[in-house]
Image (tube, rainbow, N blue to C red):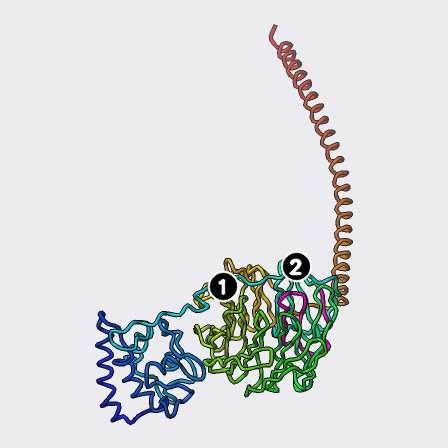
Amino acid sequence: MTNPPLSRIARVICPVLACGLLTVASAAEPPNFTDQVLPIFREKCCSCHNPDKKAGGLDLTSWGQTMAGGSSGEVIAPGDAAGSYLFMLASHESEPKMPPESDKLPVASLDVIKAWIDAGAIERAGGKPVAKRQNAIALGVLEAVRPEGPPVMPPRLSLDVVSHGERPTAVTAVATSPHGEVLALGGRRQVLLYQTNSLDLLGVLPFPEGVARVMRFSRNAKLLLAAGGEAAKSGRVVVWDVATGERVAEVGEEFDEVLAADITADSRCIALGGPARVVRLLKTADGSLAHEIRSHTDWITAVEFSPDGRKLASGDRAGNLFLRETRGARDAGTLKGHAAAITAVAWRPDGLVLASVSEDGTARLWDPRSATQLKNWPAHPGGAEWVAWLPDGRLVTTGRDRKAKLWKGDGSLERDLGSLADIGTRVAATSDSQRVFVGDWTGGLTAFTTADGKPAGGIDTNPPSLAERLAAAERVLAEVATAEQTAADQARAAADAMQLAESQLAAARQALDDATAAAEAARSRQAEATQAVDRWRAELDFATQPK
């Protein structure tokens, strides 16, 4: 699409818009391609999208070619303008914006195109609308295959941490088991395992390879993958058997840390990527190279296999997002839309929808079968950092706005999960969809209850060593012992004081009794003396009377 001279726009676009507005205003007949939409395309788009040029493989000069789409697949989703790639480009809701390096089409023109698509992309006046295709979102979440047998839990493991810092560091790797109450938290030279309900530490797995940037449980919950390394030095992927806590695989010989990794459902293949801009598919058994994907133009920041292991989604720092078949690494589609770095991708549990988030702030849903976009929406202003599906088909995301958000399967917001202390970095959901865990740049890892969005507790991402815990416990014990001795001394002093007081009280009571008896005796003698005085006064009076 190019910008024509202003004089040409003035001559052509005004009657076109007038025609479009009149048609939209008419409730009797919806817009059609031939009369309302094609004039807009001819004026603004067909200089680049015509049979001779076909920029992006797209020809907009006819209804048939427009509906056929371009090299990235179909661009029109009849009945759903918001989900149509062409409309997202023209309305500047997606990249590359069209027309390039120019303002978007006038609102009136966009209204005509939107009304035409929403009405069913009718070819000409009197034509019938194209039946709206039922996409994977409309179908809802199909029942995902759940692991069989009892939940997979780790054995008794050492609780002694390998590394403890002065303060927590940003949460860079978190995963929850799809079949068991286990959360894995990656850190520096270690992986910490926690119980998702009690939030207690279950054990520590050493990761001497460096900083763990990626944590993944296998689809059957039996294996745990950690990937990372040392920046600009080395990168490695390690796999443990969850039930035994033993290392079962170590693959990758990267010269920089691994930033993205995953393992197939059958555990036979591991994909990894990083600053080398290459996605390597390695055999889990011996670490040998199966395939390399060299279509990325920047650091690999996200990879994930589909639930059945047949496809791999990979994204990079330049905003490229590709689909590849696992076997043979053959091209399965290019997902165009994000305008900045891909930060995370996640397959819905049934494998019918792929979610992606980006530093452009949006979350997007894709149909992996047709490599087309199903939905996009602004998720986190400033950048969306991570996305995860809940087993029930909802999504949880976090980002630079310091929030975590729970979304319905169609991308509509269900609820905010509260504000974080800093930029949100990672999210993970439990296998029963009852809790989500959100990590941030301060090192906080908070559990939220999905039913009400309220915090359910926090995990200590920087636990002290056992020696430090013992020393702390001994200090507490000493303090308690000192306090107990002080209290005992105070109790004895109080007892002595009470005994003395009781003795003094007894003496006082005896003195009171003696005084009371003396008072009674004095009163008795007083009465006797009074009687004697009265008697002798009477006698004196009688004796002194005249005879």
Front one among 319 and 400:
319
Q: In this view, does 530 lie to the left or right of 448?
A: right
Identify the residue under disc 1.
141
* Label 2–label 1 contact, CB within 8 A: no
C-alpha span from label 2 to label 1: 23 Å
- Residue interval drawn in magenta: 203-226
Chain-order first, disc 2 or disc 1: 1
Residue 461 belongs to magenta span: no
Numbered label attached to residue 151 = 2
> Considering the image in quadrants, where does the C terminus appear?
top right
Q: What is the three-letter code of the residue carrying label 2?
A: Pro
217 is higher (above) or lower (below) than 68:
above
Residue sticking out furthest to the top:
547
Q: Where is residue 152 in the image (x, y as percent from the top left)?
A: 67, 61
Q: Residue at x 50, y 58 (%)?
A: 452
> Considering the image in quadrants, where does the N terminus appear?
bottom left
Q: What is the three-letter code of the residue carrying label 1?
A: Val
Q: Which residue is drawn at 75% across and 52% down?
A: 487
Q: Which of marks 2 and 1 is in front?
A: 1
Q: Residues within 10 Å of mark 2 (few under 14, many from 20)?
A: some
Q: Is the magenta stretch mostly helix, strand or loop?
A: strand
Q: Which residue is drawn at 69% across and 71% down?
A: 191
Q: Is mark 1 on a helix, strand or loop?
A: loop
Q: What element carries label 2?
A: loop
